Image (tube, grey):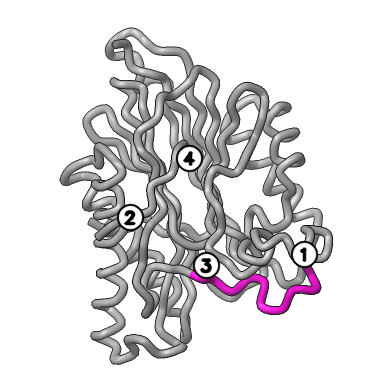
Protein backbone atom coordinates (compact mmCIF):
# COMPACT_ATOMS: atom_id res chain seq x y z
CA UNK A 1 0.00 0.00 0.00
CA UNK A 2 1.25 3.49 -0.84
CA UNK A 3 1.82 5.68 2.23
CA UNK A 4 -0.60 8.53 2.88
CA UNK A 5 0.60 12.13 2.77
CA UNK A 6 0.48 13.96 6.11
CA UNK A 7 0.72 17.68 6.81
CA UNK A 8 0.86 18.90 10.41
CA UNK A 9 1.17 22.23 12.19
CA UNK A 10 1.07 23.26 15.83
CA UNK A 11 0.56 26.41 17.87
CA UNK A 12 0.57 27.10 21.60
CA UNK A 13 -0.11 30.50 23.19
CA UNK A 14 -0.02 31.79 26.73
CA UNK A 15 -3.26 33.80 26.50
CA UNK A 16 -3.81 36.11 29.48
CA UNK A 17 -2.15 33.78 31.97
CA UNK A 18 1.22 34.27 33.66
CA UNK A 19 2.59 31.00 32.27
CA UNK A 20 1.75 28.39 29.67
CA UNK A 21 0.65 25.08 31.17
CA UNK A 22 -0.17 23.46 27.83
CA UNK A 23 2.34 21.10 26.26
CA UNK A 24 2.31 19.66 22.72
CA UNK A 25 4.47 17.38 20.61
CA UNK A 26 4.63 15.89 17.12
CA UNK A 27 6.74 12.77 16.66
CA UNK A 28 7.52 10.54 13.66
CA UNK A 29 8.81 6.99 13.94
CA UNK A 30 9.03 4.33 11.23
CA UNK A 31 6.15 5.59 9.13
CA UNK A 32 3.96 6.43 12.14
CA UNK A 33 2.99 9.83 13.52
CA UNK A 34 2.17 10.62 17.15
CA UNK A 35 0.37 13.89 17.87
CA UNK A 36 -0.17 14.63 21.56
CA UNK A 37 -1.47 17.60 23.56
CA UNK A 38 -1.78 17.97 27.32
CA UNK A 39 -3.28 20.76 29.43
CA UNK A 40 -1.97 20.84 32.98
CA UNK A 41 -3.44 22.13 36.23
CA UNK A 42 -2.14 22.31 39.77
CA UNK A 43 -1.05 24.62 42.54
CA UNK A 44 2.11 26.73 42.31
CA UNK A 45 2.42 26.29 38.56
CA UNK A 46 2.76 22.52 38.74
CA UNK A 47 0.26 22.15 35.91
CA UNK A 48 3.07 22.88 33.46
CA UNK A 49 5.12 20.07 34.96
CA UNK A 50 2.19 17.65 34.84
CA UNK A 51 1.56 18.40 31.17
CA UNK A 52 5.21 18.01 30.30
CA UNK A 53 5.43 14.69 32.17
CA UNK A 54 2.42 13.41 30.23
CA UNK A 55 3.81 14.43 26.85
CA UNK A 56 7.30 13.12 27.63
CA UNK A 57 5.97 9.74 28.72
CA UNK A 58 3.65 9.41 25.72
CA UNK A 59 6.40 10.31 23.25
CA UNK A 60 8.91 8.00 24.93
CA UNK A 61 6.44 5.10 24.83
CA UNK A 62 5.59 5.81 21.22
CA UNK A 63 9.26 5.82 20.24
CA UNK A 64 9.74 2.50 22.00
CA UNK A 65 6.72 0.83 20.40
CA UNK A 66 3.96 2.63 18.52
CA UNK A 67 0.57 1.45 19.82
CA UNK A 68 -1.23 -0.93 17.48
CA UNK A 69 -4.65 -1.16 19.10
CA UNK A 70 -6.89 0.22 21.85
CA UNK A 71 -5.20 -1.88 24.55
CA UNK A 72 -1.75 -0.59 23.63
CA UNK A 73 -2.97 3.00 23.62
CA UNK A 74 -4.71 2.65 27.00
CA UNK A 75 -1.51 1.24 28.51
CA UNK A 76 0.46 4.18 27.14
CA UNK A 77 -1.92 6.71 28.69
CA UNK A 78 -2.02 4.86 32.01
CA UNK A 79 1.78 4.93 32.03
CA UNK A 80 1.59 8.72 31.66
CA UNK A 81 -0.90 8.81 34.55
CA UNK A 82 1.53 6.79 36.70
CA UNK A 83 4.31 9.25 35.87
CA UNK A 84 2.25 12.17 37.20
CA UNK A 85 1.27 10.24 40.34
CA UNK A 86 4.92 9.33 40.97
CA UNK A 87 5.87 13.01 40.73
CA UNK A 88 3.11 13.85 43.18
CA UNK A 89 4.57 11.36 45.67
CA UNK A 90 7.98 12.99 45.35
CA UNK A 91 6.35 16.31 46.20
CA UNK A 92 4.30 14.81 49.04
CA UNK A 93 0.96 15.95 47.62
CA UNK A 94 -0.59 12.72 46.33
CA UNK A 95 -4.39 12.81 46.63
CA UNK A 96 -4.52 16.41 47.89
CA UNK A 97 -6.65 19.14 46.25
CA UNK A 98 -3.50 20.95 45.11
CA UNK A 99 -1.99 17.88 43.46
CA UNK A 100 -1.06 18.49 39.85
CA UNK A 101 -2.94 16.73 37.07
CA UNK A 102 -3.39 17.04 33.32
CA UNK A 103 -5.66 16.27 30.42
CA UNK A 104 -4.43 14.48 27.31
CA UNK A 105 -5.57 13.94 23.75
CA UNK A 106 -3.49 12.04 21.23
CA UNK A 107 -3.70 10.72 17.69
CA UNK A 108 -1.55 7.99 16.17
CA UNK A 109 -1.37 7.64 12.39
CA UNK A 110 0.22 4.79 10.46
CA UNK A 111 0.80 6.17 6.97
CA UNK A 112 1.85 2.79 5.55
CA UNK A 113 -1.38 0.99 6.48
CA UNK A 114 -3.67 4.02 6.28
CA UNK A 115 -5.11 3.61 9.78
CA UNK A 116 -5.28 5.78 12.89
CA UNK A 117 -6.37 5.55 16.52
CA UNK A 118 -6.99 8.12 19.22
CA UNK A 119 -7.15 8.39 22.99
CA UNK A 120 -8.03 11.04 25.55
CA UNK A 121 -8.71 11.87 29.20
CA UNK A 122 -10.22 15.18 30.34
CA UNK A 123 -11.57 18.02 28.21
CA UNK A 124 -8.89 18.47 25.56
CA UNK A 125 -10.57 17.52 22.30
CA UNK A 126 -10.08 15.80 18.98
CA UNK A 127 -12.13 16.97 15.99
CA UNK A 128 -12.41 15.17 12.66
CA UNK A 129 -13.41 16.65 9.31
CA UNK A 130 -14.73 13.98 6.96
CA UNK A 131 -17.23 14.01 4.10
CA UNK A 132 -17.81 17.75 4.46
CA UNK A 133 -18.64 17.63 8.17
CA UNK A 134 -16.64 18.56 11.26
CA UNK A 135 -17.46 16.79 14.51
CA UNK A 136 -15.92 16.35 17.95
CA UNK A 137 -14.73 12.75 18.17
CA UNK A 138 -14.02 12.90 21.91
CA UNK A 139 -16.49 13.62 24.72
CA UNK A 140 -15.31 15.82 27.57
CA UNK A 141 -14.81 14.34 31.03
CA UNK A 142 -16.41 17.38 32.64
CA UNK A 143 -19.35 18.43 34.79
CA UNK A 144 -20.77 20.36 31.82
CA UNK A 145 -20.72 17.31 29.54
CA UNK A 146 -22.32 15.23 32.27
CA UNK A 147 -25.09 17.82 32.68
CA UNK A 148 -25.68 17.85 28.91
CA UNK A 149 -25.87 14.06 28.85
CA UNK A 150 -28.60 14.09 31.49
CA UNK A 151 -30.79 16.19 29.16
CA UNK A 152 -31.90 18.39 32.05
CA UNK A 153 -30.22 21.55 30.75
CA UNK A 154 -29.75 22.62 27.14
CA UNK A 155 -26.53 24.09 25.79
CA UNK A 156 -27.91 27.65 25.73
CA UNK A 157 -28.08 27.68 29.53
CA UNK A 158 -24.49 26.61 30.06
CA UNK A 159 -23.44 29.68 32.05
CA UNK A 160 -26.06 28.82 34.68
CA UNK A 161 -24.37 25.52 35.55
CA UNK A 162 -22.07 25.84 38.60
CA UNK A 163 -18.61 24.28 38.31
CA UNK A 164 -19.28 23.56 34.65
CA UNK A 165 -15.57 23.36 33.84
CA UNK A 166 -14.65 20.96 36.64
CA UNK A 167 -13.06 17.78 35.31
CA UNK A 168 -14.44 14.36 36.19
CA UNK A 169 -11.27 12.60 35.01
CA UNK A 170 -7.63 13.61 34.51
CA UNK A 171 -4.22 12.00 34.50
CA UNK A 172 -2.80 12.22 38.01
CA UNK A 173 -6.22 12.26 39.70
CA UNK A 174 -6.78 10.29 42.90
CA UNK A 175 -9.63 8.37 41.29
CA UNK A 176 -9.05 5.38 39.02
CA UNK A 177 -8.40 6.50 35.46
CA UNK A 178 -9.95 4.70 32.49
CA UNK A 179 -8.72 6.31 29.25
CA UNK A 180 -11.13 6.66 26.34
CA UNK A 181 -9.51 5.01 23.34
CA UNK A 182 -10.52 3.96 19.85
CA UNK A 183 -9.81 0.86 17.89
CA UNK A 184 -7.81 1.45 14.69
CA UNK A 185 -9.93 3.00 11.93
CA UNK A 186 -9.27 3.61 8.25
CA UNK A 187 -8.15 7.03 7.09
CA UNK A 188 -9.91 8.70 4.19
CA UNK A 189 -8.47 11.06 1.63
CA UNK A 190 -9.03 14.67 2.72
CA UNK A 191 -9.50 13.84 6.40
CA UNK A 192 -8.51 16.71 8.69
CA UNK A 193 -7.91 16.44 12.43
CA UNK A 194 -7.69 19.08 15.15
CA UNK A 195 -6.35 18.35 18.63
CA UNK A 196 -6.86 21.27 21.03
CA UNK A 197 -7.04 22.36 24.65
CA UNK A 198 -10.19 23.84 26.18
CA UNK A 199 -8.65 27.30 25.93
CA UNK A 200 -8.68 26.84 22.14
CA UNK A 201 -12.12 25.35 21.56
CA UNK A 202 -13.80 27.34 24.35
CA UNK A 203 -14.15 30.46 22.18
CA UNK A 204 -14.77 28.70 18.87
CA UNK A 205 -18.02 27.01 17.96
CA UNK A 206 -17.79 23.91 15.80
CA UNK A 207 -19.44 25.73 12.91
CA UNK A 208 -16.79 28.48 13.03
CA UNK A 209 -13.94 25.96 13.10
CA UNK A 210 -15.51 24.21 10.11
CA UNK A 211 -15.91 27.46 8.15
CA UNK A 212 -12.31 28.47 8.79
CA UNK A 213 -11.14 25.04 7.67
CA UNK A 214 -13.09 25.33 4.42
CA UNK A 215 -11.33 28.64 3.70
CA UNK A 216 -7.83 27.53 4.74
CA UNK A 217 -5.03 26.72 2.31
CA UNK A 218 -2.91 24.70 4.75
CA UNK A 219 -2.89 23.43 8.35
CA UNK A 220 -0.81 26.48 9.30
CA UNK A 221 -3.37 28.80 7.72
CA UNK A 222 -6.20 27.04 9.54
CA UNK A 223 -4.50 27.45 12.92
CA UNK A 224 -3.54 31.06 12.26
CA UNK A 225 -7.09 32.08 11.36
CA UNK A 226 -8.47 30.39 14.48
CA UNK A 227 -5.85 32.18 16.59
CA UNK A 228 -6.88 35.48 15.01
CA UNK A 229 -10.49 34.91 16.09
CA UNK A 230 -9.36 34.27 19.67
CA UNK A 231 -7.25 37.42 19.69
CA UNK A 232 -10.12 39.49 18.33
CA UNK A 233 -12.29 38.42 21.25
CA UNK A 234 -9.71 40.00 23.62
CA UNK A 235 -10.89 38.00 26.62
CA UNK A 236 -9.03 39.33 29.70
CA UNK A 237 -9.37 35.85 31.24
CA UNK A 238 -8.15 33.99 28.16
CA UNK A 239 -6.70 30.62 29.13
CA UNK A 240 -3.63 29.13 27.47
CA UNK A 241 -4.72 27.91 24.04
CA UNK A 242 -2.98 25.27 21.98
CA UNK A 243 -3.72 23.05 19.00
CA UNK A 244 -2.29 20.62 16.48
CA UNK A 245 -3.77 20.45 12.97
CA UNK A 246 -3.29 17.43 10.73
CA UNK A 247 -4.37 17.03 7.12
CA UNK A 248 -4.39 13.70 5.33
CA UNK A 249 -3.73 13.72 1.60
CA UNK A 250 -3.46 11.38 -1.36
CA UNK A 251 -1.46 8.20 -0.98
CA UNK A 252 2.07 8.83 -2.23
CA UNK A 253 4.68 6.91 -4.10
CA UNK A 254 7.25 5.33 -1.80
CA UNK A 255 9.73 7.89 -0.44
CA UNK A 256 7.57 10.93 -1.19
CA UNK A 257 5.86 11.30 2.19
CA UNK A 258 8.64 13.17 3.96
CA UNK A 259 8.72 15.96 1.40
CA UNK A 260 5.08 16.86 2.02
CA UNK A 261 5.10 16.53 5.81
CA UNK A 262 5.57 19.74 7.77
CA UNK A 263 5.54 20.72 11.42
CA UNK A 264 5.72 24.31 12.55
CA UNK A 265 5.39 26.05 15.90
CA UNK A 266 4.51 29.56 16.96
CA UNK A 267 6.95 31.76 18.88
CA UNK A 268 4.69 31.61 21.93
CA UNK A 269 5.70 29.46 24.91
CA UNK A 270 6.00 25.88 23.70
CA UNK A 271 6.86 22.71 25.59
CA UNK A 272 8.86 20.09 23.71
CA UNK A 273 9.36 16.62 25.13
CA UNK A 274 12.72 15.44 26.44
CA UNK A 275 13.48 12.37 26.01
CA UNK A 276 -6.53 -2.28 33.25
CA UNK A 277 -9.48 -2.20 31.40
CA UNK A 278 -10.20 0.73 29.15
CA UNK A 279 -13.22 2.38 27.54
CA UNK A 280 -13.18 1.49 23.87
CA UNK A 281 -15.03 3.74 21.43
CA UNK A 282 -15.64 3.54 17.71
CA UNK A 283 -13.90 6.18 15.57
- Tell me residue 34's x, y (percent): 34, 41
Q: Which residue is mark 3?
A: 20
3 and 1 marks in contact (CB < 8 Å): no
**Comparing labels 1 and 4, the label whose residue is closer to the camera:** 1
| Mark pair 3, 2: CA separation | 30 Å
Q: Which residue is mark 4?
A: 264
- Tell me residue 104's x, y (percent): 43, 58
Q: Which residue is mark 2?
A: 278
The tag on residue 153 is 1
- Element under disc 4: loop
| Mark pair 1, 4: CA separation | 40 Å
| Mark pair 4, 2: CA separation | 33 Å
Q: Earlier in the sequence, mark 4 or mark 2?
A: 4
4 and 3 marks in contact (CB < 8 Å): no
| 202 drawn magenta | no
**Comparing labels 3 and 1, the label whose residue is closer to the camera:** 1
Can you tell which quarter of the image residue 3 is in?
Answer: top left
Q: Earlier in the sequence, mark 1 or mark 2?
A: 1
How dense is the environment of label 2, judged by Cα within 10 Å: few (below 14), some, or many (20 and up)?
some
- Element under disc 1: loop
Q: Is residue 227 above or below residue 255?
A: below
Can you tell which quarter of the image residue 223 is in?
Answer: top right
- Tell me residue 70's x, y (percent): 31, 44
Q: Earlier in the sequence, mark 3 or mark 1?
A: 3
| Residue that lies at the very extreme toward the left in this rendered image | 64
Q: Which residues are magenta?
A: 158-168
Q: Main secondary structure of the magenta part?
A: loop
Amino acid sequence: MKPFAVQVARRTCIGSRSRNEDCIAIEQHRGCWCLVLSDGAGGHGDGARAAQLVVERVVTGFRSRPPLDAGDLAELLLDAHDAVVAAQREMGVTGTPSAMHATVVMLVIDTSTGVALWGHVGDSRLYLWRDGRLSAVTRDDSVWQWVLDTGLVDAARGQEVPNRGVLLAALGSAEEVAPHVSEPFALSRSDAFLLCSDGWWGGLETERISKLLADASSPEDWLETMMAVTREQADPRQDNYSAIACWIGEALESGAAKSTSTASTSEADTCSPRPRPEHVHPP
